[in-house]
Amino acid sequence: MEWLSAENVVAVATAGLGIVASAVMVWYERRVPRRKRVGYRVQMDNPIGDGAQSGRANVRLGLFDEAPGMHRATLVLLRIENDGSQGIAHEDYTSRELHGLTVEFTDRAIHGVSVTQPPGTDHLMSHFTPHAGFGYDVGGSTLRIPRVPLNRGEHFKLLVLLSGGDVGCDIRLVGGIRDGEVHPNRSATPDDKPPLFSRAARLITIILTASVVTLASIVIVRDDDPPPLGCEKGTLTVVGSTAFALVAQGLAKEYEKDCEGSDIKVEARGSTAGVGELAAMEGESRARRASVVAFSDGRDKGAGSALRAEPVALSVFTLVAYKGLDLRQGLTLAQVRRVYSGAVRYWDDLDPALPHWRVVLVSRDADSGTRQVFQDRVLAGRWEGVPSTSLGCDLQTDTAAPVRCELGSTADVLKKVAATKGAIGYSELGQARQHRLTVNRVALDGATADVDAIEYDDSPYPYRGVENAYTYADLPAGSLAGSFLTYVRNHGQAAIRQNGHIPCTATEGERLCDE
């Protein structure tokens, strides 16, 4: 089922994950109590006095050398903060004493304390009085801290002068908070603010963000274009023209991509051969006859009355010559007709400026529509006058006439012309362009093979013909052949133009295909 595609399953699963994460977050916020927390950390614990270390050198500060009881003096900076999610009030401290919290300095005696607070929290200082329980016993190791109200994120610091113990001795903040806790803070650097969101909130936010990104990626990547109307499944064979083979192959792949379940094979064996194969299906079933489409360069004169021809594109062809044969100035139609009549054996017989090379005519076989259009449009309806004298245009052939061979495809002609000194042949324009480094295209009567010039400037270039799609009689409804030809009409313009043809469905193409 289409709705059970991998993309849909991933999308639904991701959306479900996002919904579950949202529900968990709502439950967490409603059911899990927000704890009140007082955190503390030791930001400094340094020795002072004789032999204390300052920077990179040991110096004798001498500040406490003579003070009684200041042996092994140290300074401790303690930060106390509200790093929970709620504010802490006076009554939130659970101590039974007047003060709220107690700092215990193991093995050290307190000699003095100073309170500091960040800007904007001057109201905290009013709580650090003996009447609020703030203070310490002389020689004692316990510092009493009053019940200081702390808004979320507020903190204060205590700078304590101590003696008698080693740096790094245990320091603990003792006390209780209603619906909360007092804990050593190791989650952030000393001067960092507490995180804005709880760990659970951050985790859920990450899950939701990942869900949204995944869904957005699916929307962007997936192809939501609906398949073309009339998509049909099954198997279709496209036969005929080798000149139109690249277009047929490209359109077949596009159709198979847009219409899943279709299988289109392109077997280009020549226009006449393709139309003949279709005509020979007279005794086959209607469904079997509807499984073949034949492309032909021009109208096939041998097509029977049972076949139907649909103009698809105006195909442009060109003469091609061996790279070293300088025919870039082109030939007149009269010169071409002389060459193909057999009257010119060597190229310098045609033009003294040309080299003394044997004329080699690389032609197509009798099944070729490209050859038929060449004879009709360039040779004025005449047959090529030179008989085939060699299977592979062998220059060793001993004959008074030019050498001529017949090959089965446009690609074979281009390869043979490129490899044979003095060779000339003909090709569909798009494929000739792909071999521009190995062959020269030959202008006719001063006009070059140019699709834009023919379509928009009404160029008189003669070597062109209408590409027709042949089917056997009227196609049955719902046939893959009919769907494919509809696809060619509606979606094939880009592929047709890309390969050097003019679509018959284009504005100017309709006029040109009717000529």
Image (cartoon, rainbow, N blue to C red):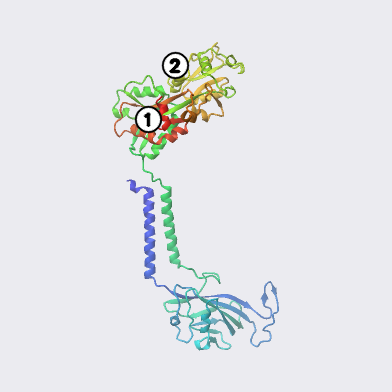
**Residue located 29% across and 31% down the image:** 476
Q: Amino acid at mark 1?
A: Thr
The span from disc 2 to disc 1 (Cα, nearest Å) is: 32 Å
Q: Residue furthest front?
A: 457
**Residue located 49% across and 15% down the image:** 388
Of discs 2 and 1, which sits in the foreground?
2
Q: Amino acid at mark 2?
A: Gly
User: Mark number for residue 413?
Assistant: none
Mark closer to the chain start, 2 or 1: 1
Q: Quadrant of the C terminus?
A: top left
* Residue marked by disc 1: 237
**Residue located 30% across and 34% down the image:** 478
| Residue 240, quarter of picture | top left
Image height of 324 relative to 234, above or below? above
Between residue 474 and residue 443, name the one nearer to us: 443
Image height of 155 relative to 334, above or below? below
Q: How many circles with numbers are drawn on the protein?
A: 2
* Residue marked by disc 2: 381
Measured as percent of width and height from the top left, residue 347 is found at: 58, 16
| Residue 137, quarter of picture | bottom right
* Secondary element at tag 1: strand
Q: Is residue 393 visible?
A: no
Badge 2 density bin: few <14, some 14–19, many ≥20, Cα 10 Å? few
Q: Is residue 67 left or right of residue 377?
A: right
* Secondary element at tag 2: loop
Between residue 49 and residue 234, name the one nearer to us: 234
Measured as percent of width and height from the top left, residue 163 is found at: 61, 83
Badge 1 density bin: few <14, some 14–19, many ≥20, Cα 10 Å? some
**Residue located 67% across and 72% down the image:** 55
Measured as percent of width and height from the top left, residue 502 is found at: 44, 30
Q: Is residue 341 visible?
A: yes
